[in-house]
Image (cartoon, rainbow, N blue to C red):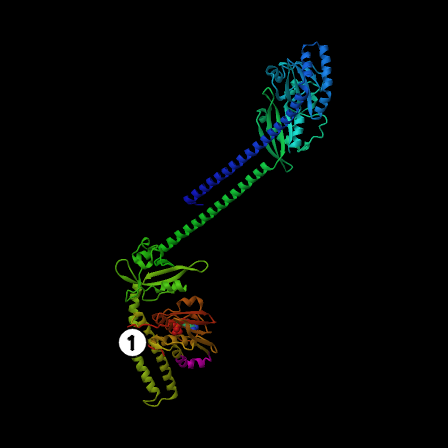
Amino acid sequence: MRFSRSIIFVFIGIAIIGSLFLFWLYEGYDQRRSEIVSREQNDAQNQYSSTINSYRLLSQSLYDEVINSERVVNIISQADQSSSSKQAVLRDELYRQFLPVFNRLQNKNFKQLHFHLAGGVSFLRMQAPDKFGDQLMSIRPSLAEINRSGKYLEGFEEDKYFSGFHYLFPLFDQQKLVGSVETSVSFSTFSQQMSSIFPMTYQFLIKKNVIDDQVFADVSRFYYISELNRNYFYEKEQGEQNRVDNVLPEELTKINNALKNKISAKMAAGQIFTESLAIDKINYLVSFIPVKNIGGKQVVYLVSYHKDDTLYTLKADLIDRYIYTISVLLIILAFVYFISENQQKLLDAGERIQNITAAMGEGLMVIDNAGLITFFNKSASDLTGFSAKEVINKPYLHKIRFVGENDDKANDKFIKQVLDKKQLITTTRDLYLWRRHGDKFPIAASASPLKTKDGRVIGCIIVFRDITEEKAIDKTKTEFVSLASHQLKTPLSAVNWYTEMLMDQDVGPINDRQKSFLKEILDGNQRMVKLVNSLLNVSRIDMGTLSIVPEPVDLIAMTESMITELQFGIKSKNLKLIKRFDKGFPKINLDPSLMRIVIQNLLSNAVKYTREGGLIEVEIKKQDAKTAFMLVKDNGYGIPKNQQSSIFKKLFRADNVKSTKVEGTGLGLYVAKAVIEAFDGRIWFESEENLGSKFFITLPLAGVTKKEGTRGLEANT
Ligand code: ADP
């Protein structure tokens, strides 16, 4: 397959624009995606912070209202200085004092209320009063920090007994730091709390090694290996069955299984990230937020599970747009391909036409409706001397001058006729064309309308050839025929005259047999006179010596008289004749002797070529304000389709009539056409073999102007 370079460029251009557009779509998608992802992550973080805040408020008021009292500070301050038995008494007192408070705190999901002495030793764990005395400073950076700064602090921290979120308050005895107290909330409490407020499910994952290293063995049973990542634990406490789950546990399991291979590297790198996935036709967003402990180490991941279609819809939308864009691109490419193919075909066809027309002996030119030349082949250039370049897209009138033989008036009526009447026209005679330099030369041209598929005429195709030589030969022939006919006329007249004398018995009696022979001689002689007259007429037409002497003619009266003359033939063949003549049809300025020849020819043809008992119709009317119309119609032999184009040619007779006994010369219609065209009229016919023929004539009602010539025509009756 051949592609022109421009088409390849168009293809590449479309591909580049298409790719850029797809890239632009993807950029838009990616930006929206990051927005959604960061919104999701921010939401999770905000929800986490607001939960921290709400527990801080509770812890703060507990500290302000209940813990930070003289009595408590005293107990802690004393305990620091006391022996272990004294400490036991003080611890017991503190425990009893805080038991009701602690019970209420537990209802609020606090998991721990823990008093420490200065120096980071555990003094009383309200939730496990028998676990105390352990030095926590080394494993609890928060205790080291509060002992150093004496300031409140909060955050996640692992602990031997309890890993979770701690709120730590200093205890001062007259500005001396004597110890500290902390309230703690477990991550499972946090996640429940958050899930009950926000439409997500949360899970805190704690690094397994942190728990393994630091937590008392008897509490590690609350920690379970995460399905997401085996290096992490999640926390589950007894009595947690009633937690609010926006995403159900069985869904969580499926999600975790689907994600586990994708996320471990990102978790190991401590990244914040969000994954989207669909399970059982439900779309989820799962965000992983790393959480640092008080010591600044990232040991926890907050994982939020959210049923959310936004990313899925965004992706589906992107895919839809991709499909749409690619389809449009493919359609455009197919369209371009289709056009290029057609263009190529047209170019090929154009090239072929160029080659063919360049090889033609005839000149070929095409004129559009506006009279501009759109095509001019090589022979047209050779004949006229104008190159195609000089004439293409220029009005033909500027260069191409069709004229007559004897004058230089424009003789291009045939072009207008083709454009108006949309019919093929073959010019017969008297058409000349001026060459670029020098002389004019005779041409024979045929012009046909250039039509679109739906029949609109968009121009005119003219094929023409130089007929100088033919014309010269014709002239010689015509002169010979003219001369011979003239020479024949005198002896034929003599034969006619003497035969009639003999038949009239002017020179003696003759018997019947002799009479019938003489009749044959007379008939034959008259046929010869007719032929000679026709030949003379034709030669006068061909030599251009025809004269036109116009006078007002009553066409109807003329036709009536011709019908009367043909009465014998009509009667003997028993033909029916219908006349339709317009009343008040005007007289027209025509040469009556020439017009008679035409009408006589059409009517006698109708009579000759119609079978016995046939029907002839003759109509004369005004076609419009300017045109006379005549129709001679018969239902006779008709003219075979394949011979119709030759009917107006000299000496032509169709095969279907040649085989009948009907006599003819094949010259009548040639003469009729020459006469009608000399009258600026038109003659044509429609015919179907065995059904009949219609011969039409139109003439300008304005009539014809006088034309000087040597002779008129011989009447053929
Ligand atoms: P001809 O002397 O042969 O009639 P014309 O020039 O008048 O010569 O006609 C030429 C030929 O056209 C005829 O020979 C005939 O084949 C055909 N033709 C003319 N008129 C008719 C018609 N009315 N019906 C059938 N054929 C016709």
Q: Is residue 230 visible?
A: no
Percent x, y of residue 640: 44, 68
Residue 620 lies in what quarter of the image? bottom left
Q: Is residue 150 left or right of residue 496?
A: right
Q: Is 710 contained in the magenta span?
A: no
Relative to the observer, which residue lies in front, 10 or 649? 10
Residue 90 position, x and y percent, is 72, 13
Of the 4 image quadrants, the one containing the N terminus is top left
Q: Is residue 625 above or below residue 272?
A: below
| Quarter that holds the C terminus | bottom left
Location of residue 439 in the rendering, given as x and y in whole percent from the top left corner: 26, 61
Q: Which residues are magenta?
A: 560-576
Query: Camera-side residue: 414 or 701?
Result: 701
Which residue appears at 33% of the width and 67% of the height?
Answer: 429
487 sits left or right of 667 in the view: left
Q: Is residue 226 left or right of residue 408?
A: right
Q: Position of residue 94 (x, y in %)?
A: 71, 16
Q: Tell me the amino acid under the disc marked 1.
A: His
Q: Quadrant of residue 652?
A: bottom left
**Mark 1 falls on what kind of element?**
helix
Q: Is residue 85 left or right of residue 229?
A: right
Q: Nearer the viewer, residue 531 or 195?
A: 195
Query: Is residue 574 on the magenta stretch?
Result: yes
Q: Is residue 672 visible?
A: yes
Give the answer, above or below, for where 337 lies relative to 610.
above
Within 10 Å of the Cα at label 1, are there few (<14), some (14-19), or many (20+) other Cα atoms? some
* Dominant SS in magenta: helix
Mark 1 highlights which residue?
486
> Would you identify the image quadrant in which residue 259 lies?
top right
Q: Residue furthest bottom?
A: 509
Report if the beta carbon of the residue with label 1 is closer than 8 angstroms to ligand 1.
Answer: no
